[in-house]
């Protein structure tokens, strides 16, 4: 048992046995070992335990194979140590601490041998995981050489091969220097104090004076390192001084040597930051990713080990849990994907899938980014931004000078001058590519007519599928108009029969009478949609019925009372009732009920330039490439509580349509009570203006059917509506006076005034935030009739409103910036 334990215990000190045998054998030695005994006393808390040695788990060296030994490769071999058999002469020390000259000569040979053996042993063992050194111990009788092997344990910091892959390089543990002299002294000559100028090893932090720095560091192939520290990674506490020499080193080395040493210190691979200590978006970097990060045009400044987050789209860079500290080069494929909680934001507003901090939110508001409704933005590296799911650039964050001021105020990074967009004072409107116009109103308010006129004006034709759907609606309406004539004919026929009894004038054939009765029955039941499907069979019957003199007489009698659309389509009944009928643009414009199947219609167009606009200066001209999107929205299809209105949060302008003839018309509400249609328009307008989604939008009130108002105002006074009870215009006796406009024009202005007053009561003014000034939003009003020119003028007026809104917003932002600059300067 003792023999087995002796193989694994460290080599003990070999002491000569004083009680040797009498034969005087000088080679008699003995080894002293101690064994632990079992403790049977009281219980002791936190008692350290010694784990038993597992003999089968102790690593052993394998013999070198013949193939390796015969390959001609030389391997380091530890030279055997020979114990000195003769007792060395005693050293006589003088009082000054030096060896006596008489003894120095006799001991020089043995000392040189010991140093030679130690040098050979140290050079032969080259592995960082194990080392051997020869030390000498003095005893009263003799000096003994002892070899001590320093084998690092598996749990040490440098043994990382158990935790990494085979292909990953593992750096050895950084050695630490031990001070042998007094505090502040040189680690080699042990002289000097803490005020003595010294050079520090960037690995073990050993300090050497000017006399010892060259001897301790040698030629410095890896920079300021001890010769024993060459090949080890530097200490992270010394990384900030990498490549920065001291004044003492400038005196010791020449300029060329100093330049070479500093360059080697910076470029040496072992001195570089270990990639495994840098984690980006929760993933540790490899060597290639770290090299890409450090060699990019705008690398991170003062990169230290730690966890970082990186916005690969915009280039934002910061520590995990903190706001961004720098904007580096974007589009680098390093690390993982950014997490929404990377910067620990609490603003509920996201940029590139990261929740931003409060300071970033204040900066965005300061530069004019609309952050209402908790939006999610995509921000590009050049500063342009857009909302998620929207293919529309909303503006540029770095296009204003106040953006850098805002970053300075809130301690946020700004892009480098070389990669940032040059600041300018152009409004964001010039950078937008699409403006959305939301067209909304009650049924038969003229909004659908504006939509159809816009498609005709700006050359956006209807597709074949759309024309087929419109064809069904036109033919259905045609049978409804025909039923109106037939119904009037039957009433007139009954009156004639009751008075004269003569049936020769108004009688029709039995076959046509049967078709007429069937048509009237289906109209009462609301099943007129069945007739367009059988238009091929019914076309001939409709033509014969329309040619009956009694029907023609009834039509002529009703023509002045029928709607304009009915007169238009009944005049072309023979053509429209055919199966091969294709609607023309004018037919589509005159058609009613298109909004019933197109709850949401959208058209994208651009305004053609006019000769008047071309004559203006370039600063006042509109961008010909600017696109506009007109969205026709039916309020009845918004769902409960208007949930679908959230889809149009990015609308730039709301066009609210009201028919001027609604003041004399009534409809039933949900309770079956008759309500004036103008009051219904008023209630809808109030709901739209006060809705949170449209609270900050600009409104354009379009009063339609002005041509019909000119006819109706003469028969039905405007005061019929209770909202217009105070309408009492002053009428001049001089009909030719220019101050005596027509009654329809007076009614138009009064209706617009009533809506403006309502708008002002619903929307308050907002302050500029500085200087005590405030802006009050305005309600813009325009009129539209059936003519296409009026629609074109109204839509161009909407374009001007958008431009005024941008200029007003820019003025508000400039005034806010001026006030902030004034407060900062004071």
Image (tube, helix red, strand yellow):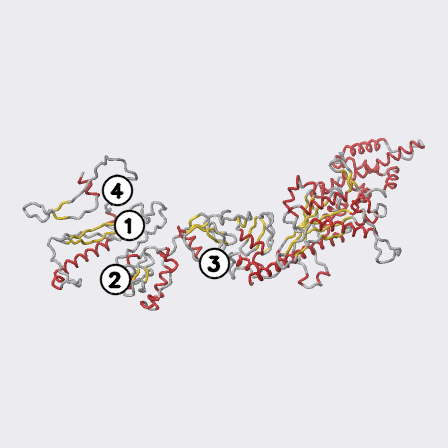
Residue labelled with disc 2: 189
Residue at the right extreme, as displayed: 500
Instruction: Establish if 145 lies above or below 212.
Output: above
Q: Earlier in the sequence, mark 2 or mark 1?
A: 1
Q: Earlier in the sequence, mark 2 or mark 4?
A: 4
Can you tell which mark lies on residue 58? 4
**Percent of width and height locating residue 318:** 47, 53
**Percent of width and height locating residue 268:** 36, 58
Q: Are marks 1 and 3 in contact (CB under 8 Å)?
A: no
Residue 255 picture quarter: bottom left
Secondary-structure class at tag 2: loop
Q: Are marks 2 and 4 in contact (CB under 8 Å)?
A: no
Q: CA distance from mark 2 to mark 3?
A: 45 Å
Q: CA distance from mark 3 to mark 4?
A: 51 Å
Confirm whether residue 584 shows in the render: no
Secondary-structure class at tag 4: loop
CA neighbours of label 2 inside 10 A, class few (<14), some (14 to 19), many (20+): few
Q: Nearer the viewer, residue 756 or 264?
A: 756
Q: Earlier in the sequence, mark 3 or mark 4?
A: 4
Looking at the image, which residue is at 60% across and 60% down? 819
**Percent of width and height locating residue 770:** 62, 58
């Amino acid at each position: 048992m003792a023999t087995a334990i002796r193989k694994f215990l460290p080599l003990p000190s070999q002491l000569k046995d004083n009680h040797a045998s009498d034969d005087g054998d000088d080679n008699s030695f003995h080894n002293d070992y101690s064994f632990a005994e079992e403790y049977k006393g009281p219980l002791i808390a936190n008692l350290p335990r010694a784990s038993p040695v597992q003999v089968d788990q102790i690593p052993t060296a394998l013999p070198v194979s013949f193939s390796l030994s015969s390959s001609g490769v030389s391997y380091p071999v530890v030279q055997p140590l020979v114990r000195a058999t003769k007792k060395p002469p005693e050293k006589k020390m003088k009082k000054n601490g030096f060896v006596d000259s008489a003894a120095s000569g006799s001991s020089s040979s043995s000392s040189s041998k010991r140093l030679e053996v130690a040098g050979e042993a140290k050079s032969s063992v080259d592995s960082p995981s194990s080392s051997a050194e020869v030390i000498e111990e003095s005893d009263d009788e003799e000096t003994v050489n002892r070899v001590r092997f320093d084998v690092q344990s598996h749990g040490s910091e440098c043994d990382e091969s158990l935790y990494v892959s085979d292909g990953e390089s593992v750096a050895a543990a950084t050695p630490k220097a031990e001070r042998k002299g007094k505090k502040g002294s040189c680690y080699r000559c042990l002289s000097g104090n803490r005020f003595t100028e010294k050079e520090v090893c960037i690995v073990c932090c050993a300090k050497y004076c000017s006399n010892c720095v060259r001897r301790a560091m040698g030629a410095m192939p890896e920079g300021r390192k001890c010769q024993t520290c060459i090949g080890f990674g530097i200490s992270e506490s010394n990384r900030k001084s990498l490549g920065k020499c001291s004044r003492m080193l400038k005196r010791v080395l020449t300029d060329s040597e100093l330049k070479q040493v500093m360059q080697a210190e910076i470029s040496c691979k072992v001195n570089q930051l270990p990639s495994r200590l840098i984690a980006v978006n929760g993933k540790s970097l490899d060597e290639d990713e770290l090299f890409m990060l450090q060699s990019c045009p705008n690398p991170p400044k003062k990169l230290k080990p730690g966890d970082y987050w990186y916005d690969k789209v915009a280039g934002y860079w910061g520590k995990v849990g903190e706001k961004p500290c720098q904007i580096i080069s974007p589009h680098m494929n390093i690390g993982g994907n950014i997490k929404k909680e990377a910067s620990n934001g609490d603003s509920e507003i996201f940029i590139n899938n990261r929740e931003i901090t409060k300071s970033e939110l204040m900066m965005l508001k300061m530069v004019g980014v609309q952050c209402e409704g908790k939006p999610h933005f995509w921000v590009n590296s050049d500063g342009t931004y857009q909302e998620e799911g929207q293919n529309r650039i909303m503006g540029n964050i770095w296009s204003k000078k106040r953006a850098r001021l805002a970053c300075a105020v809130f301690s946020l990074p700004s892009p480098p001058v070389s990669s940032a967009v040059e600041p300018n004072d152009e409004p964001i409107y010039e950078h937008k590519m699409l403006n959305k116009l939301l067209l909304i109103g009650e049924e038969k308010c003229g909004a659908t007519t504006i939509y159809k006129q816009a498609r005709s004006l700006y050359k956006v034709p209807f597709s074949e599928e759309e024309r087929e759907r419109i064809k069904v609606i036109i033919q259905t309406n045609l049978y409804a108009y025909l039923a109106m004539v037939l119904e009037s004919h039957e009433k007139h026929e009954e009156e004639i029969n009751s008075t004269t009894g003569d049936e020769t004038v108004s009688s029709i054939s039995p076959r046509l009478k049967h078709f007429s009765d069937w048509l009237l029955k289906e109209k009462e039941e609301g099943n007129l949609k069945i007739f367009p499907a059988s238009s091929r069979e019914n076309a001939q019957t409709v033509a014969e019925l329309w040619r009956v003199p009694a029907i023609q007489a009834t039509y002529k009698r009703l023509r002045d009372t029928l709607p304009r659309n009915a007169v238009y389509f009944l005049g072309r009944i023979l053509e429209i009732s055919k199966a091969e009928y294709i609607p023309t643009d004018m037919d589509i414009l005159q058609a009613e009920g298109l909004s019933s199947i197109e709850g949401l219609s959208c058209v994208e167009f651009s305004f053609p330039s006019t000769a008047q606009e071309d004559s203006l200066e370039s600063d006042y001209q509109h961008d010909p490439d600017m696109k506009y999107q007109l969205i026709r929205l039916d309020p009845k299809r918004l769902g409960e509580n208007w949930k679908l209105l959230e889809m149009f949060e990015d609308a730039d302008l709301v066009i609210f349509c009201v028919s001027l003839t609604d003041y004399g018309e009534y409809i039933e509400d949900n309770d079956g009570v008759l309500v004036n249609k103008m009051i219904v328009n008023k209630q809808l307008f109030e709901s739209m203006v006060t809705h949170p989604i449209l609270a900050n939008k600009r409104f354009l009130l379009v009063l339609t059917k002005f041509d019909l108002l000119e006819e109706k105002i003469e028969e039905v006074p405007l005061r019929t509506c209770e909202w217009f009870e105070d309408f009492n215009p002053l009428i001049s006796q001089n009909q030719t006076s220019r101050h005596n406009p027509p009654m329809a024009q007076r009614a138009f202005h009064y209706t617009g005034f009533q809506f403006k007053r309502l708008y002002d009561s619903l929307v308050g003014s907002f302050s500029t935030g500085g200087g005590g000034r405030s802006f009050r939003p305005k309600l813009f009003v325009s009129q539209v009739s059936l003519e296409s020119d009026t629609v074109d003028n109204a839509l161009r007026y909407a374009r001007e409103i958008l431009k005024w809104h941008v200029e007003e917003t820019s003025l508000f932002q400039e005034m806010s910036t001026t006030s902030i600059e004034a407060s900062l300067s004071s």
